[in-house]
Image (cartoon, grey):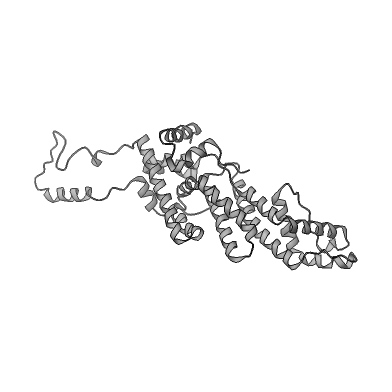
């Protein structure tokens, strides 16, 4: 879709109601959506700095010793790039046995990593792995920029990983800063990102209902699921007000039993048909949003392009208003740095 159309429609909505979607939409239009992954990685590295420095020193000793040939894949990181530190630690963890031999080539050497050091390295690598994977998926969308739905799913997977690690490991000092960053992130842009996630026809509300209980717990998750559902319908109502879709004549305009002037069909003998029409008209009306959410999910494939899906003529015809809303929300700029 055209960038100007996105800016004009969303900006118009925010001018009319700055607090739409809890004010998140206005905030995100003023700045590109970023991610907390780099900041979270730096928090993990900071919490484990003493252990990381020790591993780094030991790698230096190994590379300078005669036993380097036993661990040819060891390397030193660029401490300005957290992903290389993760790779360094992961490589050292895979070849940790070689460090126990240092005392044989360096007489009196007493600073080899301990069992506790390796336990901490394992926790650090587990946490950084999820962040590295998320960053890789954001970058992998090139040359097309990642969509807001991509950002939502990567943030959700990182958060789920944090919750699992918190339950399985004793790494509170590593996990707490990450949890705080994720909580802050959801408060700032979680509602908009969740709506974008629902606008991905491969997931819709099902992924929200699946993942929220795992992250927020059963009771609290119901509140957040309802918040997403309410936000969806609130935003859709705003789009309907911007450009009401054209409805065919049979959706309104004539009463039962009316007909065109000069028509040859009268009401004689069609009383049962009139009752049928009245009963059909009394059934709950389904909006585009209702129809979209009720339809089956699209197949998940690596080649699926969510923006192109919403641009299809058949989709735009079926969802004339919802397709505009989806394209706008999915096209809010996302930063990968």
Q: Can you say whether 70 is above or below 336 in the image? A: below
What residue is shown at x 66% (from left), y 52% (from top)?
43
Q: Is residue 240 left or right of residue 147?
A: left
Q: Position of residue 236 (x, y in %)?
A: 38, 42
Decide which of 170, 207 is in the foreground and name it: 170
Q: Can you say whether 122 is above or below 294 in the image? A: below
Res 83 seen here = yes
- Choose top left, top right, bottom left or bottom right for residue 102: bottom right
Q: Is residue 20 left or right of residue 148?
A: left
What residue is shown at x 49% (from left), y 31% (from top)?
4
Q: Position of residue 116 (x, y in %)?
A: 72, 66
Q: Can you say whether 240 is above or below 166 in the image? A: above
Q: Can you say whether 65 is above or below 29 in the image? A: below
Decide which of 135, 111 is in the foreground and name it: 111
Q: Quadrant of the C terminus?
A: top right
Q: Position of residue 318 (x, y in %)?
A: 37, 44
Res 302 seen here = no
Q: Is residue 195 left or right of residue 275?
A: right
Q: Position of residue 314 (x, y in %)?
A: 40, 43
Report the residue that reaches farthest toward the left: 268
Numbered marks: total: 0
Q: Is residue 149 left or right of residue 108?
A: left
Decide which of 188, 277 is in the foreground and name it: 188
What residue is shown at x 40% (from left), y 50% (from top)?
229
């Amino acid at each position: 879709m055209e960038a100007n159309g996105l800016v004009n429609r969303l900006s118009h909505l925010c001018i009319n109601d700055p607090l739409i979607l809890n004010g998140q939409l206005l905030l995100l239009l003023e700045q590109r959506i970023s991610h907390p992954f780099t900041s979270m990685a730096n928090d993990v590295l900071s919490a484990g700095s003493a252990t990381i420095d020790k591993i780094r020193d030991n790698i230096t000793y190994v590379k300078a010793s005669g036993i380097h040939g036993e661990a040819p894949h060891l390397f030193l990181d660029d401490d300005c790039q957290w992903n290389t530190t993760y790779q360094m630690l992961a490589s050292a963890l895979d070849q940790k046995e070689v460090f126990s031999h240092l005392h044989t080539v360096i007489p009196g050497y007493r600073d080899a990593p301990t069992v506790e050091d390796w336990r901490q390295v394992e926790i650090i690598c587990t946490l950084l792995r999820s962040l590295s994977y998320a960053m890789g998926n954001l970058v992998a969308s090139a040359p097309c920029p990642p969509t807001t739905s991509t950002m939502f799913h990567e943030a959700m997977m990182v958060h789920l990983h944090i919750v699992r690690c918190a339950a399985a490991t004793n790494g509170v000092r590593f996990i707490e800063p990450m949890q705080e960053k994720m909580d802050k992130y959801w408060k700032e842009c979680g509602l908009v990102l969740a709506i974008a996630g629902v606008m991905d026809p491969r997931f819709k509300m099902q992924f929200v209902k699946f993942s929220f209980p795992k992250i927020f717990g059963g009771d609290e998750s119901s509140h957040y699921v309802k918040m997403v559902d309410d936000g969806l319908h609130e935003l859709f109502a705003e789009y309907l007000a911007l450009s009401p879709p054209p409805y065919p004549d049979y959706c309104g305009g004539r009463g039962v039993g009316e007909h065109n002037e000069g028509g040859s069909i009268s009401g004689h003998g069609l009383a049962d048909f009139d009752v049928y029409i009245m009963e059909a008209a009394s059934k709950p009306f389904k909006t585009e949003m209702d129809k979209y959410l009720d339809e089956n999910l699209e197949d998940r494939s690596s080649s699926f392009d969510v923006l192109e899906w919403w641009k299809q003529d058949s989709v735009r015809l079926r969802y004339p208003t919802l397709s505009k809303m989806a394209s706008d929300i999915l096209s809010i700029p996302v930063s990968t740095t």
